[in-house]
Image: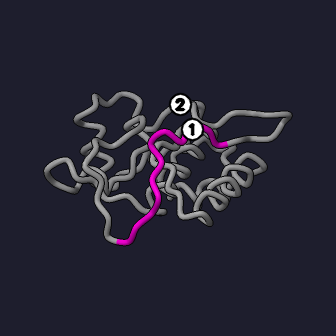
Amino acid sequence: IKFALEIANGLEHLHKFEIIHCDLHPKNILVDNGVLKITDLGCSKIFRENSLSNSNPCGIIEFIDPQCFISSRKKFKRNYKSDIYSFSMIMWFISTGRKPFKDSNKFTLAQKILEGLREKDLPQKTPHEYINIYQ
């Protein structure tokens, strides 16, 4: 739970300054003196209501918000919920030690994410708080 709170606090701090990370995944979470830190703001954006980005979505596909696969012509909507989705996938990763949908190719994986599918088999030791965030 400590990890979840530290990541959530980091996201809250970014969002207070209207920054959307846009590339949140486990490799962008580092440990500094026992405290988790969100790093790599290279894909981050200042949030603007109803804004679109002309770039391809940044990130590792398992952690990308499903909304990014909906928009057409390479325009992807990003908002604070995009980071929250990525955060929930990080909680999955922390609980299981692996990315979700590990056996899927990229196309199948994107389709599963777009359809809002979730893996059903969480480890028995998964804290209920993580399950609530993930779902």
Span shown in magenta: 38-49
The answer to whether 106 appears left or right of 86 in the picture is left
Nearest to the observer: residue 28 or residue 42: 42
Type of amino acid under label 2: Arg
Earlier residue among tags 1 and 2: 1
Task: Identify the secondary structure beneath mark 1.
Answer: helix
Q: Residue 61 magenta-drawn? A: no
The rendered magenta stretch, by its main secondary structure, is classed as loop
In the image, residue 43 lies in the stretch drawn in magenta: yes
Position of residue 91 relative to residue 48, above or below, is above
- The image position of residue 123, as x and y in percent, is 60, 41
Q: Determine whether label 1 and label 2 are within 8 Å by CB.
A: yes
Q: Which mark is residue 118?
A: none
- Percent across and percent down for residue 107 are 22, 35
- Which residue shows up at 62% across the image and 56% down it? 11
Instruction: Read off the residue under disc 1.
Output: 93
Q: Residue at x 45, y 48 (%)?
A: 22
Position of residue 133 measured from the top left corner of the image (x, y, whole percent) = 58, 59
Q: Is residue 119 above or below residue 134?
A: above
Disc 1 to disc 2, C-alpha distance: 5 Å
